[in-house]
Amino acid sequence: MWRYVIRRLLQAIPTVAGVVLITFVLFNVVGGSPAAMVLGQNAGARSLEEFDEARGYNKPLFCGNWTGTRALEEVDFEEAPPSVRAKWGAGVTGPLRLEDGESLTYPLAFPLSEGETWRLTVTGQGEGFPDRGDRLPAFSMVWKKSFHGVGNPAFTAVGGPVEIDSVRLERGTRHFFDSQLAHYIGRVMRLDFGTSSSLNQPVWNLLKAGIGPSLMLTVPILVIELVVSLTLALLCAYRRGSWLDRSLVAVCVGLMSVNYLVWIVIGQYVFAYKLGWFPVWGFESWRNLLLPVLIGVVTGLGVNVRFYRTILLEEMHKDYVRTAFAKGLGEGRVLFKHVLKNALGPVITQVALALPFLYTGSVLLESFFGIPGLGYLSLNAIHSSDVDVVRAVVLVGALLFTGVNVLADVALAWVDPRVKLS
Amino acid sequence: MSAELTPPSTEPPQASVSFGREAWRRLWRSPVSRACLAVLAVFVLVALWGEAANAWYSWKDVTPPWQAQNLDARYLAPGAGHWLGTDGLGRDVGLRLAQGARIAFQVGVVSSLIAIPLGVLLGCLGGYFGGWVDDLVVWISNTFASIPGLLFVLAIAMVVGKGLLGVFLAIGLTTWVGVCRLIRAEVLKQKGRGYVRAARALGFSHRRILFHHILPNVIHVAVVSFTLRFPAAIGTEVFLSFLGIGAQGEPSWGAMISSARLRLWQGVWWELAAVTVSIFAVVLAFNLLGDALRDALDPRLHIAQD
């Protein structure tokens, strides 16, 4: 048994790595730094850089010795818009022109910090291009200069005019693998989920505060759902083909087809507002949870009853059921004692699949009924581009899912020892 | 629709009637399926009309009638002028409903066009080649499957940005896993069959065996999952648009529910009712058709019935 548990745990490692990688690709590679979205259009380059620094966004994505900086956005004079050209003192079109002896003045958004290594790269051509060696002046030439902190190096045209095509300033990384990926993996390892940019609190605290209300909502939903839908499914299987079975299945398909939103909107309007049976909004007493739990159960009922019914019916075609009937056992005994026990495997899997949903809560139920759980938290985070919170919720959800899957498999192996062999 | 319902079958199980035609015959025999097909035909026609009308008005550069505000005609109950009434800005609910059908249709089709080819391709490759290819496919699908669905959708939509593109990608990239798993399992089953061994013995290339021989025999799985994905995609779109992440400034069903919800408290019920009934009809038709299709296409069930 223990060997099986360990093997199953080892199998989960690639999945965990994959989840970390996907969240990284989604939020860092595709999403990029949310600094501008969070801080607004009018934020200065320096505060943007500080935001990036705190969250590791100012590093190269995967690896590299140099990375861009907001102190001086990379500029290509062929494509630069007029506002950028004006900052550099360039003409209306074409490359930036320096006369003999003239130095390049770069419009730094903020002074460069001293402790870092910087590299300035200028490409262009012309007779006065410094350090051009033996190359012909007609070709585009590259001038690179590394330096430390304050004293910005001067790029001066010597002995003729220079036409500059592009200027790029980069900051040196500490080492080749000092990247966003390494930063992210390190933080995940330390279970450091960063700071919420909209609420200015550690994400970890927000998760801890939100999980309680979420569980209060979702655990009752799961338990009631399981009991009710298994009972109904057994009823259907017991009386399969009867009008009861058929009408229940029809009702289930109907329930499945009503949109989730509609359940909530109508439920809240009719039962809480019109009839006044439940409180409309808030999270003060257990009575606030009644209606959301009810709606949660009803919305999942259709799918679950049909699923369990299919499992039970599939089980009923098996040989041992025929044997049980043949030796004269009653239908009820066969159903509840033999079939239900044997159908436990898929039921466990189904419940395990629903468990991570417990943690994230129900986004819609929580926001409609004002329950301060993780669903509500992540929805607000999405609206305010609070990437750290969204990423943490997604990541923790996925890790929990993987863990729960391992637990479910172990439980399955415990219920049905044959599983271990495959 | 009929093109999708009759997968080209190179290996007919019965000598006389092709598998696809037989399945279609079974499907058409049931009045419920016929009713579903009729509902879906209406839905598709309305959506196509909505698409054409939208294209026409944007080409003419005129404000389309479903966006034209008329503050004198706010909150009109259903009547002769506006069959389904008007909303809080005096816009005709019926026309907006038709445009909502267009968006729902778009989302269903485009997200399926992302999810199904991706799932079918990876499932086929993994199931057929086995070994490290299969390990890779299983790893990717396990990873995607272990991220909580709705949050993943929200996160993708957030990263890609507000708008329908985010909705397409979010739904497409989260739903291919189910298709992939079903197809992979089916391909694994087919791989050991005699016709595959025969094709291999004849020296056919892997590509030919996989895509000309095995694929037609497993594609019914993709067809069934299409009919189940479609309503799910509509539901997700409604959810995203309701939250303001989906369609921007367009009369999507989710956005209509979002605005109708607040007016319900003032007794304006028709907007919500119209959207609710439309979604219900379309999703119910898809669900019932999906069941019927599965029964018609699954050879295992035929044996059980006979």
Image (cartoon, coloured by chain):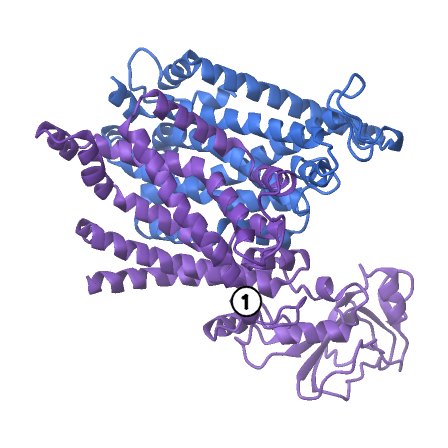
Chain colours: A purple, B blue
Residue appearing at x 18%, y 32% in the figure: A318
Residue appearing at x 73%, y 64% in the figure: A36
Q: Is residue B237 visible?
A: no
Q: Is residue A84 left or right of residue B143?
A: right
Element class at badge 1: helix
Q: Is residue B236 left or right of residue B292?
A: right
Q: Quadrant of residue A330?
A: top left
Q: Quadrant of the C terminus of chain B?
A: top left
Percent x, y for residue B5? Answer: 46, 22
For this rendering, which residue is in front, B35 or A326? A326
Q: How many marks?
A: 1
Percent x, y for residue B114? Answer: 53, 40
Question: Mark 1: which amino acid?
Answer: Ala
Q: Quadrant of residue B264?
A: top right
Percent x, y for residue A87? Answer: 87, 70
Residue appearing at x 24%, y 31% in the figure: B193
Residue with the most extreme left position: A327
Q: Is residue B37 visible?
A: yes
Percent x, y for residue A195? Answer: 61, 71
User: For mark 1, what is the residue?
Assistant: A209
Q: Quadrant of residue A276?
A: top right
Residue appearing at x 22%, y 31% in the figure: A316
Image vertical order of residue A261 relative to residue B5, above or below: below
- The chain containing the residue under callout 1 comes to A
For this rendering, which residue is in front, A400 or B170? A400
For this rendering, which residue is in front, A36 or A276? A276
Assess disc 1: are there few (<14), some (14-19) or many (≥20) residues with their C-alpha within 10 Å of its C-alpha.
some
Image vertical order of residue A112 relative to residue A40, above or below: below
